[in-house]
Image (spheres, rainbow, N blue to C red):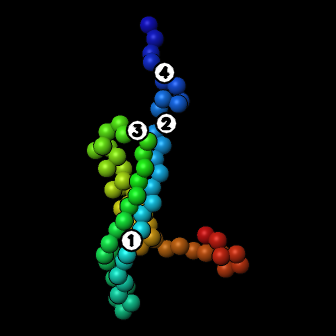
Amino acid sequence: TGFYRPEVKDILYETYGAAVAEVELDVLTGESKPLYTYVMFDCAPCLNPYIDLGQIEGAYVMGLGQMLLEERKLCPKTGKL
């Protein structure tokens, strides 16, 4: 007996996306509040729309959390992360 081993080209699930959020920032308290979000997402043939929706929402929330809550340190000489 054997097992099924798919070709690499058969298991690739390439997706591309971009998101923009308009965020209100209270400069006195530092509180931030997302007002609007625009997400564009392209996934080639859709295997399961619910999986795609979960991936889109998860990626957006992860990126928003990273931008709003995590400290970014830049190199003072080059300005790079």
**Label 1 Cα neighbours within 10 Å, binned few <14 / some 14-19 / many ≥20:** few
Q: Residue at x 42, y 45 (%)?
A: 43
CA–CA distance in space, label 4 to label 2: 13 Å
Residue type at mark 4 is Arg
Please state, as top left, top right, bottom left or bottom right, where the N terminus lies in the image.
top left
In this rendering, the answer to whether 77 lies above or below 8 is below
Q: CA distance from mark 2 to mark 3?
A: 11 Å
Residue 68, disc: none
Q: Which residue is mark 2?
A: 12
Horizontal side of residue 24 vs 13, given as left or right: left
Which image quadrant is residue 22 in? bottom left
Identify the element where label 2 is drawn.
loop
Q: Earlier in the sequence, mark 2 or mark 1?
A: 2
Q: Which residue is mark 3?
A: 45
Disc nearer the start of the sequence (2/3): 2
Whether label 2 touches label 3, CB < 8 Å = no
